[in-house]
Image (cartoon, rainbow, N blue to C red):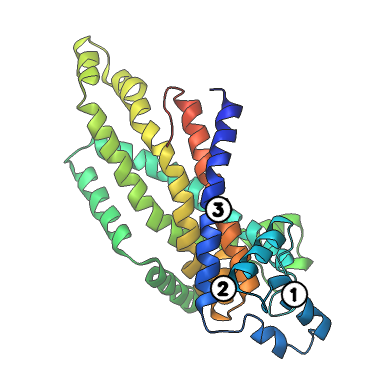
Amino acid sequence: MNLMGYILKRIYQTIPLLFLVSVISFFLIRMAPVDPLAELRLNPSITQETLDYEVQRLGLDKPVIVQYGKWLKSFVHGDFGYCTTGEKVADKLMERIPNTLLLTGFVIFFTWAVGIPLGISAALHWRKPLDRILTILSSIGMAIPSFFFALLLLLFAVKTGWFPTGGLTSYNYNEMGFFGKILDVLHHLVLPVTVLFTISLSGLQRQMRGNLLDVLQSDYVKFARAKGLSETKVIYKHALRNAINPMVTLLGFEFASLLSGAALTEYVFQYPGLGRLILEAVMKSDINLVMASLMIGTIMLVIGNLLADILLKLVDPGTEAV
């Protein structure tokens, strides 16, 4: 199967998943004894025409199954409705999605740039002081809850004043030059990236270490050594390639875990991302925003897994991703 056919096949396979997520999410939210338009009705800037339109669009005077059908039809046509604040949901999502992708992109880049070399070093120094130190540090990193670690860093930022305590930009962001704006955004990203990077690094480093140790014990590596090949060639040409292939499949899961784990971190640092948006929408019972955010988040997870599968197929054409 060529690459394009493989991509189309994977896309077709995700359609039932998206449908099931939408059904489960919609009916769980509808089970809550809350008026989806309660806050919208209390907002003085919302006109009666807008309320009537939302009632008709959501089918609130119809059975739940009809309401779901109306919502699904509107979602497919890109009509996400309005938030309780009166803003369009689509505008809110377009404002937050790039921020989440920016945060996630930085975390994944640094995690893989540091985690893979550390995992290799730990495997090559198995049961030596370096391996033991890295094992202890990774265990600590995996044991620390992201929410608690985020609070500690927030207190550190408040006490020292070295880092911003929230947001993505400073109050005078628009007055800065081009490079000043870039530095300002990077300065605001330091703490949330540090939290997510620390949590993600621990698991990735240990996984890489375990994979390489398993490969180094395989028969073909022993045969390569018996042939007289140098240790460097055995490790980096034969063993490492096979040890790193399974790591590619983790890329999609890494993306998924970051999106779910970033919600609390974004909330602590008041980072304007998709995870914080979903939390705030749930607490306000903003049905339109919750459903749209959940579906967009699911689509982003599917895309992350698809990219990981494609990358794995390019790295190892003989492997069929599941």
Q: Amino acid at mark 1?
A: Gln
Q: Earlier in the sequence, mark 1 or mark 3?
A: 3
Q: Return the residue nearer the eye: 212 or 275.
A: 275
Disc 3: CA contacts within 10 A as few (<14), some (14-19) or many (>=20) = some
Image x and y of residue 59, in percent: 69, 73
Q: Amino acid at mark 3?
A: Leu
Question: Badge 3 is on which residue?
Answer: 18
The residue located at (57%, 23%) in the rendering is 2
Q: CA distance from mark 2 to mark 3?
A: 29 Å
Give the secondary structure at mark 1: helix
x and y, in percent, of residue 27 in the image? 52, 69
Q: Which mark is residue 270?
A: 2
**x and y percent of residue 202 in the render?**
34, 52
Judging by the rendered image, the residue that carries numbered circle 1 is: 56
Q: Is residue 156 left or right of 142 when viewed as pictured?
A: right
Give 316 or 75, whichever is nearer the viewer: 75
Q: Is residue 231 above or below residue 87?
A: above
Q: Nearer the viewer, mark 1 or mark 3?
A: 1
Residue contact at pointers 1 and 3, CB within 8 angstroms: no
- The residue positioned farthest toward the top in the image shown: 227
